[in-house]
Structure formats: C-alpha cells, structure tokens
Amino acid sequence: MSLNETPNANRLHIAVFGRRNSGKSSLINAITNQQTAIVSDVAGTTADPVYKAMELNPIGPCVFIDTAGFDDVGELGMMRVEKTKNVLDKTDIALMVFCDADMSLEKEWLEELKQRNIPVVAIVNKADVLNNAGKLSDKIKAEFKLQPIVVSASKNFNIDDVKNEIIRVLPADFESDSITGHLVQENDVVLLVMPQDIQAPKGRLILPQVQTIRDLLDHKCVVISTVADKIDEALASLSKPPELIITDSQVFGLVYGKKPKESKLTSFSVLLSKYKGDIDEFVKGAAAVDTLKETDSVLIAEACSHKPLDGDIARVKIPNMLRKKVGQGLKIDVVGGNDFPEDLSPYSLIVHCGGCMFNKKYLMSRIERAKTQGVPISNYGVVIAKLTGILDKIDY
C-alpha cells in the first residue's frame, strides 16, 4: 500500500453473490470498467473470494469481493461455499445476481443478508442470452419485494443503473463518523504521544496514528507529536495546556500522571474502538477484569497477522498485566487476522485490538458474536485503562 492509497479497512465493501456461471465476475469487470476478475464459461472458476480495491465514482474507494457460486457441489465445493459465507461478515452492500428460475438458494442467502441488515441490489444478468429475463425480474419483485436491474455485463447494458442503485442503498452511516470529531474543535492543540516500540518499526508510523493525524488535520487542529520520554519537554514548549492528549495505550499511566488537569486524555486504541466498534460494549466488557479468576481463560484478538516479537502487546504486555492482577495461572489464547473462534464460550473475556485492518462491518460482527454468546468483549486501550485504574478518567 502506498502512502496515497486508502486502506482497504476504510473502503466500502461490495460483495457479489450468486450461482456458478451467473456472471458475477463479468459484472464486477463491467462495474469497475477493468478486467478485475477472471471470466470463464467453466462453472466454478472463482474459488476463494477475490478482493479488488477500486475507486467507484462518486462513492470513492471501494472493495469489490468476487465470491464462489453458492451452488457449488462436492467436498471442495462446500469449502468454497463456506468461504463465501465468511464474506458476509465484511459485506456493506450485497449484489445478488439471478440467472435461473429456481431461486431457492437465492432465497436462503437473501434471508441471511436480511438478518444481518445488509442492503441488497438485485440483478438479473445475461439479458443478452436469457429469453426469460423479464419474467425472472417479475418473479423476483413478487417473491422478494426487490426491484431487480436487468443487465448484460458482457454487453455493458444497464451497468450505470447498478452503480446508481449502489449509491442509493449506501448505508447512512458510511464514513459519516470521525475518529476525533467528538473531542475536538477547530484550532484545538492536540498532543500525540507516539509509541516507539516493535509495533512502530523504525521509519514508520502505524496505521492508527496516520488515520488519527489525518482526521485531526481535517478538523483544522494544531497537531504536535512527541514520544513518551519527552512529554515534559513537549508540554513545556506550549504556551497553554493542550485541549487533548492522545497517547499510546501502553503508557496510559505515565501520561496520565503528567498531563495537565485541563487536558482531556484518550488513546489511539480507544479512539479506534469507538470509530469502528462499540465503545459502550467495550467499557462494559472491561468490567469483567474485576471478576476474572485464575482458572479462567481470556482470548486476545488482533487484526494483524505477524510473527510474534519480544515485548508484543498482545502476547506479552497485556497478558502480563492481566496475570499480575488475576494470577499467573490465567490462561490466555492469542489469535490474529481472520482467526476468530466460532465458539467463544470457553472464554471469560475477549480483548480485541482497535481493528484498524478491519472494516467496521467485520469488527461489529465479532462484537455481535460475543454479545450473542454472552461473553464480555473489550479493547486493548480500554482494558489497559481499566488495569491502570484510569478508565473513568479518560475520554472516549
């Protein structure tokens, strides 16, 4: 990813669902006006979901997800269908492609999409070869109360109508939120206390820092950055206390002890947890720290998949803090990337990262899974603030 690219986690995720050989890949190519997906007359050409970052005018940055046909068969086919189901957790808008009079499978998938509150654009593809496209469209209207768009992806027929419908069903809250807008005003001085450890390799800033800085600049704030061991010098250089201090969660205690009483305090992780997740649920979940027993198990989940390093926050720092409070026998499991258990019942607490590598839909799906199973879930920064004893003194 270049410095000028929008991270996939901040892009609208548009997934295309349908039967094998229904023209899903051709549809993506027509919408994006590029040969984004491999097209073949052979059913089942698309195996694993294929993610392609694009710009869709006037929405802006999007990710199109080409999925395997949900009518795939055989042992391998069932594995492909399962991977297609996993895409639902990340889907902001679904394009459902119809091409057959038998719509029993489409009905099942539409019901799942409805349960997840995912907007659907219904599409009848291959209008250039189907003799019954009009009848099929009428049947979809009658049975599913949808207004399908009849298209020919190969002939680029009615593709603009699909784009317009995507814009119409765009979730109301997409990109309406801000990372820092609820805490700052124009001209506010904001001091950033940046992490300088293995999570922030030399010469680079980690994504939450970059996103937060950009958001503050969009709000026309004065942004000043420092490291933890220079916070005294940074504060002394200012003519008045900063309106807000945003710190690396790992030094919450240190920064809280040095901050001016007039300054609000939060962390990058806490801000991301509000921006992409459910901050109220995370604060509620953090209360479970007080009731943990040494015989309990805790799950730590991070969005990044990387080789563990000495001093890693997920594998070393948070476990050490939890065990110091609860006892050395506390069992802690760590998962990364898309590895997140279906069954969360063995755990008494889940501690999730800020989710900067996930889109909001995906992070919220994990929160909902935890809530459904009755397992408290929180966030790195919120839990660290709780363990430091300052959760009720920070802003979020």
Image (cartoon, rainbow, N blue to C red):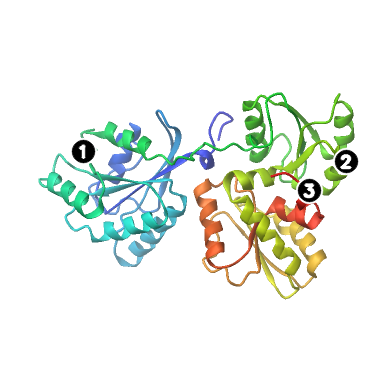
Of callouts 3 and 1, which one flags the residue occurring earlier in the amino acid sequence? Answer: 1
Tell me the kind of residue under disc 1.
Answer: Ser
Label 3: element kind = helix
Instruction: Name the residue tied to disc 2.
Output: 258
Instruction: Give me the disc on residue 393.
Output: 3
Q: In which quarter of the image is residue 375?
A: bottom right
Distance from Cα at disc 3 to Cα at disc 1: 58 Å
Relative depth, front residue between 348 and 49: 348
Task: Tell me the residue at 52%/36% (across/down).
Answer: 176
Q: In terms of secondary structure, where does tag 1 sit? A: loop
Q: Residue 235 carries which label?
A: none
- Which of the marked residues, 2 or 1, is nearer the chain's N terminus? 1
- Tag 2: amino acid: Lys
Which residue is rendered at x = 27% and y = 54% of the image? 19
Q: Is mark 2 on a helix, strand or loop?
A: helix
Give the class, few, some or many, for how many residues have Cα within 10 Å of label 2's Cα (few <14, many ≥20): few
Residue 323 lies, in percent from the top left, at 78, 66
Mark pair 2, 3: CA separation: 14 Å
Residue nearer the viewer, 213 or 287: 287
Q: In this view, does 341 lie to the left or right of 17?
A: right
Please rate how many residues cluster around mark 3, counting C-alpha atoms within 10 Å: few if below 14, some from 14 to 19, many from 20.
Answer: few
Q: Which of marks 2 and 3 is nearer the N terminus?
A: 2
Residue occupying image coordinates x 69% and y 45%: 396
